[in-house]
Amino acid sequence: MMPNRRIAIAFAPWLALATLAVYVDLAGSDFLLHLAIVTAIYATLAMSLDFAFGYTGLFSIAHASLFGLGAYVAGLLIAELGLPPPLAILAGALFAALIGTIMVALFSRMEGPYFAIGSFAFGELVRIVLNEWRSLTHGPMGLVFPPQAGKFSFLWIEINFRDKRELFAVVAVLTAMVAGGLWLVLKSRLGGRMTYIRDDPNLAMSLGVNVFRTKLASFAISGFVAGLAGGLFGIYLQFVAPSLFSGLESVRLVMMVVIGGAGTLFGPIVGAALIVLLPQALRMDPTDSLIINGVILVLVVLFFPRGIVGSAHDFILRQLTPAGGGTIAPTAAATPERSGAP
Amino acid sequence: MNVLEVESLSLSFGGVQALADVSWQVKQGAIAGVIGPNGAGKTTLFNCVTGFLRPTRGSRVTYGGRDVTGWATHRLARAGLVRTFQHPKSFVGMTVRQNVVASTRLAANRPDADAILRATELEEFAERRAVQCPYGVIRRLNLAMAMAIGPKLLMLDEPAAGLNDRERLALRRSIQMLRDAGCTIVLVEHDMSFVMSLVDEVMVLDAGRVLTVGSPDHVTSHPDVIRVYLGQFAHAQGQRT
């Protein structure tokens, strides 16, 4: 296939997102801006999960906790040490990367559902610590960000995070940067090794891939992005509480990835948009929205097993490629059963 | 000079002694075979040598003069000790060519993927998705992927299993070509005509122990080998005739 067609397919979702961004900006609606900010943050978070799950096969159900750690560390550093918000967000992201890496090191020998269960337990442990360490985190009451978390000025740059338009601009730029950065990593040597591990870790190691180190690197990047999204979320809400980062929230993230298309990077943006926006569009309460999410998941798994973007990508490729040629990128979900021993 | 030396290699799974005090040497540039009945410990031996399993204390594996006991698989592969698997594997979603290219990208010297496809006679399948290819093609693809890494010692686990006559001949040519290029080959195989016509030396394992080591002629006439292993083939041949 022509390379420019591939590029066109890869960047089509971005064109759609940019159009949406312009539309939202022009509309000037406070509520639409709120939805756009939340969608962009969750899209970033879902992309971070896809990086680990869809590309490395690390089925993490701990990403909501890493998201929460990013938010808490950012909030605490602003409140306790008076760090400027960008530095606090960066530190939160680095801390989430560190904790995520420790988790993968602990569970490095676990694969598939075993890793998922281990990561779920780890995520719950993090949430319980956040909930119970009241002297630091204020427990279930949550942590209210101090007033200085609402603005940032450096040289000629001045950002008011309480202004939704300004915050949306920051979040949109960071989301685009994260997407571009992750895409570049996926095209690098590390990206290749990640997919080899996802497809068959035993085959990969027999060909010289250091599976342990590759998993750590992949999850460090994924955890960093999840923590970054968490920091932004905290800055947006000016508040964090353990209940925002429960295991159920991690499962919702998995749904975003699976619905959008695991192993497609941009698919989770669509998944996040659907999961965040649809209940709002249908004016449903949170409990009913869980039912809608479940219905969407079942429909996608039945009719679009590679997710919405994955299946659309395959369909377009089939239309553009002469019969008999071309390949279809696999997803973690499509990976055949893996044996523990060779 | 020996490229591989195994000394007192032992491993047990619970109460089952999978390998018991196995000692063996493979000469540089040789084609060596490992045979034995099912459960004899052949694949376990491969797994211990290639770092998939850690043998018990006191075991020692020397490769190229270096003690490599306990080395990780990827480290051994980078040092030139490469293996294939009893059940053929491939990277999902990739064509045969892409699988070979993926392997060449992991090699230090980036060999030409097309040359490897030619050497393993896989050109006609190059653009097909590996998972959709016949079993024998995926087996030979595994050999091609291992070749792409630039092995000095290649360990093949049942490379001829499930191959038809034409594919077996292609496999034989590839193995001989590899040996001519200076690579040492160790293969586990049940196809006796394939093994015996190809190897310089054979080790026979039974219940985790070395029964005998020697030339194909020595092994095929060894009474214990006939009793525990080759007898069943002779019996099967007798039934066919």
Image (cartoon, helix red, strand yellow):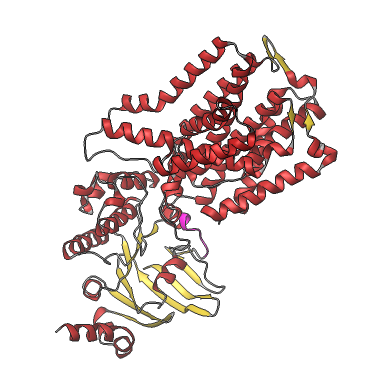
Q: In this orientation, does residue A193 appear?
A: no
Q: Residue B136 lies in magenta, yes or no?
A: no
Residue at the (59%, 35%) spot, across then down: A289
Q: Residue furthest right?
A: A135
Residue at the (22%, 34%) spot, across then down: A322
Give residue B167's quadrant in the image.
Answer: bottom left
Image x and y of residue B188, in percent: 33, 70
Vertical arrangement, residue B231 with respect to residue B79, above or below = below
Q: In this orientation, does residue B203 appear?
A: yes
Q: Where is the C terminus of chain B found, in terms of image quarters? A: bottom left
Give residue B236's quadrant in the image.
Answer: bottom left
Residue at the (36%, 70%) spot, across then down: B26
Residue at the (85%, 39%) spot, across then down: A135
Q: Residue B72 lies in magenta, yes or no?
A: yes
Q: Is residue A206 left or right of residue A162?
A: left
Vertical arrangement, residue B11 with respect to residue B130, above or below = below
The number of numbered discs placed on residues in the rendered structure image is 0
Q: Where is the N terminus of chain B found, in terms of image quarters? A: bottom left
Vertical arrangement, residue B6 with respect to residue A101, above or below = below
Nearer the observer, A52 or B55:
A52
Image x and y of residue A176, in percent: 52, 24
What is the magenta range?
Answer: B70-75
Q: Is residue A271 left or right of residue A245?
A: left
Nearer the observer, A309 or A51:
A309
Image x and y of residue A220, in percent: 59, 40
Image x and y of residue B83, in percent: 38, 60
Q: Is residue B196 left or right of residue A201?
A: left
